[in-house]
Image: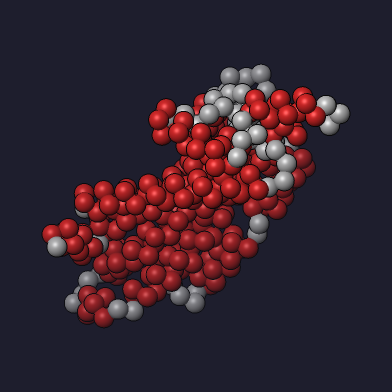
Amino acid sequence: MIGYIVRRLLIAVPVLFGVTVINFLIMRMAPGNPVDMLVSPKLPDAAREAKMIELGLHEPIYIQYWNWLKNLVVHQDLGYSMITYEPVTTMIWDRMGPTVLLMGVALILGLCIAIPVGIYSATKQYSKLDYVFVTGSFLGISIPNFFLALLLVYVFSIQLNWLPSGGMKELGSSGSVTTLIIHMILPLIVLVASVAGRNIRYVRSSMLEILGQDYLRTARAKGVKEFFVVNKHGMRNALIPIVTIIGLEIPILFGGAVVVEQIFSWPGIGQLTLSSIMNRDYSTLMGLNLVAAFVVIAANIVTDIAYAFVDPRIRKSYVGGSKR
């Protein structure tokens, strides 16, 4: 397992390098630049050119990329924002906490709903509750996040005035745990609906496939109680595809939180990403893309490691592969 993890980490290095190259080229090929957002259109060309030189945008693209990569590798420095002149590392770190909090709670709640509901739906196939759960899962997948978010704001914030429409705390207050929870309710509903909707179908289909296996029929014939047949013998084997889906949820949530954070004014990575795109803040966008790529690769590695704990056969194959 250790050798496998080391190999995956070594493969991640060229992958991250390729991601940074592609992102850098795409950003530089897009129309506009940070100088257009900073200076007045009436500013003389000489002053505009001076600003380009100050930001290093007058050099060829490969020189700009080399300077950025050198600062990252040698100094572990992501540079400074071209708009606010703050360190990119500080900006991302300050926004990481709210995003991880929102994503983590949404993922946990979504799976706590999806796994038992999917198992029950599989064991009670074609029952009334099965149809209700399947319909609900399709609704959770089909309704766009932005539409559900705006609908919740309109109903619960504008019409009923029950919940705040955005932010993490009230203006002028230091913020308490109760206030934080109240502000998280609406964005959590949007994200949990999406996570639960996707995973109910996967858990249900995975359990249906396992429940039809011969070894479960044998367990029932031996008199094993249905609870142990489903939750001990069946669930353990059904976890393999479920673990894959859970690993994919992390990058999906990371991307989906961009829209949700913007609508609910949640001060996280998503809001910073949209702000950087609108302002053509190349330095901040490169840092955000690097973090996003790292999250995806880390999620894949953690998923592969989780396979070994779920299925001992996979762990043995890793050991055998390392010996060979």
Residue under the image location 50 percent in, 38 percent down: 66
Relative height, residue 182 to residue 211 (above, below): above
- Left or right of 317? Residue 13 is right
Relative height, residue 125 to residue 188 (above, below): below
Residue under the image location 49 percent in, 42 percent down: 290
Figure coloring? secondary structure
Task: Find residue 37 and report its image quarter.
Answer: top right
Position of the C terminus, as image quadrant, is: bottom left
Whether residue 107 is visible to the viewer of this picture, yes or no, is no
- Residue 91 location (% of width, % of height): 55, 28
Front residue of 250/19: it is: 19
Front residue of 2/145: it is: 2
- Residue 231 location (% of width, % of height): 31, 63
Query: Exactly how many numbered labels are in the figure?
Result: 0
Residue under the image location 39 percent in, 74 percent down: 208
Task: Find residue 50 and report its image quarter.
Answer: top right
Whether residue 273 is visible to the viewer of this picture, yes or no, is yes
- Left or right of 320? Residue 175 is right
Residue under the image location 38 percent in, 53 percent down: 300
- Residue 265 location (% of width, % of height): 66, 36
- Residue 209 location (% of width, % of height): 37, 75
Name the residue furthest left.
323
